[in-house]
Structures are given as C-alpha cells and as structure tokens.
Amino acid sequence: MTCQTNNNALAEAMELVLEHGLSGMPRAFEILKNEAMLVERGRHLNAEAYERTPQRQGYANGFKDKTLKSRIGELKVQVPQVRDSSFYPSALEKGMRSEKALKLALAEMYVQGVSTRKVKAVVEELCGYEISSTEVSRCSKLLDEELAQWRNRSLGNFPFVFFDARYEKVRQSGSVLDAAVLVAVGIDQKGRRDILGISVKLSEHEAHWRSLLESLQARGLHGVKLIISDAHVGLKAARKAVFPSVPWQRCQFHLQQNAQSYVPRISMKSEVALDIRAIFNALNLEEAKRLQALMVKKYETAAPKLASWAEENLAEGFTVFNFPSSYWRRLRTSNILERVNREIARRTKVASIFSNEASCERLITAILMEMSEEWQTGTVYLSIN
C-alpha cells in the first residue's frame, strides 16, 4: 500500500510539472515532501496508518501546517505528528536548523553593526529569496529574550562593585541625543570579575542611577564592601540612597586628571601630578593624609584653587587604604571598566547612531554578555585573602 501511495504522489507531482511547467513546481514539491514525511513517520512508528501490528511503537496524531521558504517559493506542508511528540521529520529538522542558523546569523550581523539594508542584500544572495526589512528586524529581536534573561539574572555576593558611564548617540523625535550607558562590574568572593548590569537612558541623572542600583539590589546583589567610581553627581546621590552604609572609593586616576584643571601654569602640571601620585602611593592612610596636608600648604599661595580642591577632594581617593594593601592596585581606580568601554566604543562605532534606546541597549548588552562569559573562564582578577 505504501508503495502504491508513493507512486500516486509521484505521478501527481509529475503531472503538475508537465501541465504547469515551472509554476507547478512548488505544489509538486509540497506533494513529494508531504509523502516523504508520511513514509518517515511510518518507519518511526514501525507501522503504517491504521495498521494493527505488535511491532507498533506509537500512534499517529494528525498533522500540523507549516510554511517553508525555498528557492522556488513558499511551500505549505503538513507535518505528521505522533502522540508522544517524539517524531520530527529529518528533512524539516535540517531545514529548521538552517533556519535557526540563518536567524542567529542575522542577529549576529546586527550585533556586529551591519545595517538592515545590507543584511537584507546578503540574505538574498545567500538564500536565493527576498527577505523584507521587517523580517530582518524581527530576526535581530530574537536576541532580546536571551539578553533580557541575562540582564535580569540573579546575582549574589560581590564585595567590590565598580560603576561608570559613557554616552552613545540615539535618535529621538527627529533629533540626535546623547544616551547615558550605565555599566556595573563586580568582583565576587573568589576574586573573579563579572558584569552585573547595564542600563541605557537619555540622562545620567540620579533617577537613572538609582533605578540601576535598585535593580541590582532586587536581583540579589549583597555583601558589598566597597563601591568604586568617578564622581558622577547622579551616582553619588543614588549610592547614598540605595547603599547608604557602603564606603565609596573615588577613582584615583580620574582624581589626577581632575586636578589638572586647577593648575594655573602648564609648567606646574608634571610637578602636581608627581605630588598626587606620591600621596596615592603612600604606605598607609596616615602617610597619605600627611602628604596631602603638605601639598595643600605647598600650593596655597602659588595655586590657591588647586590647594583648595586638593584639600576637599583628594581624601575621597583614600578609602582603599582601609583594605589589605594587596587589594589596592585593583581597587584604587575604575580602570577595570576602561577595557569594557573601549570594546563598547569599538563595536558601537559601526552603528554610529542608534535608532532608539532599545537598539542601543540590545547591542551593548550582547557585547557585555560576551565579555562576561569570557571573564568567567579567565584568570582570577583579585586574590582575596
């Protein structure tokens, strides 16, 4: 009976091609593919439809409609089902894998910064059929669920947390604006780095920082002993509201850079830099305070604004002295985020201007997710006693 059914299907397919030429090819392929899937289901069940046999290994359970794209057009097929869902036609399995691969490739091309128009052209060349810009955009959004899962994953005990902000250009209501990209990086109890969070919004105000910090807390971030960052005004207020008891280490590198704005003469810049470096390289907190006092006195006449700034701000870089000296090099600056920002800049440079905040967040999340995975298999960043 199976042989007869196969012959009938083949005859019908050939008749369609003979009668309609190339225009009959899609329907002919549908018939042949449907028949091939029926045969494969019979082999999987070890029994034909309605056949009573002790060798039967399951039961048929109707069909499910599916539309396939091919070089000869869309094919509408009926996929045979079995009751225990243990069967899927191998011909479609191959197609399903390639379809997933194509969509992931499209998403990856988007992550690499390739424009929608270029992706569309590549797909047409590789696959032999046209794909719309809407479909390309939809494919790129396949990443969204996975990325959102990663952004919202549970956290744990991270004694040291670093924060920084950078800006990306985003279109908004016909204008190009700067969107603040906030990034949080942590060092866990084993001394390994991990990217804890990322947020993109059109401001770096306290509300944006506070939202990020509260989300980290809600996801289970605890055990924080030190926060390291530059002097972002919004972050300072948010930090006090969300983590009021956690001490703050102001980035020493940025402090040295900030000091140069208060140096009245270019000839003094290198000397001032050496004085500040000596303070931060002190053997202990008491020595750092002593050197700070000497610097303030040294410049109170020649550079009064510098002296006033140093007296008020340099101590914000001393918090690290309260931790073991073996930690100082890693915790004294937010340089851990410099490589992160460089990689973001390298990849977002291709996109240039993002169509909205969501597209910006999607790309940067994908970049950070890759870096986080790389860090998890890398060397220990900080040897914790």
Image: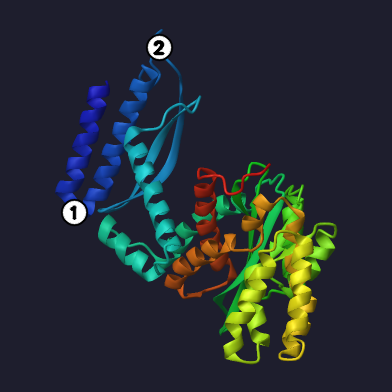
Q: Residue at x 65, y 85 (%)?
A: 261
Q: Which residue is mark 1?
A: 22
Mark 1 nearby-residue class (10 Å; few <14, some 14–19, many ≥20): few
Q: Residue at x 69, y 69 (%)?
A: 279
Q: Position of residue 3 (x, y in %)?
A: 23, 23
Q: Position of residue 359 (x, y in %)?
A: 54, 67
Nearer-the-camera pick, 44 or 150? 150
Quadrant showing the N terminus: top left
The amino acid marked with disc number 1 is Leu
Q: Earlier in the sequence, mark 1 or mark 2?
A: 1
Quadrant showing the C terminus: top right
User: Which label sits on residue 76?
Assistant: none
Q: Residue at x 56, y 72 (%)?
A: 356
Q: Position of residue 27 (x, y in %)?
A: 27, 47
Left or right, 234 with reference to 344: right
SS label for mark 1: helix
The amino acid marked with disc number 2 is Arg
Give the quadrant of residue 49: top left
Nearer-the-camera pick, 272 or 69? 272
What is the spatial separation of the Cα atoms under label 1 and label 2, in whole angstroms?
41 Å
Q: Residue at x 69, y 56 (%)?
A: 161
Q: Position of residue 81 (x, y in %)?
A: 44, 31
User: Which label sits on residue 52?
Assistant: 2
Asked if residue 336 is positioned above or below residue 170 in the image, the reply reads: above
User: Looking at the image, can residue 251 be seen?
Assistant: no
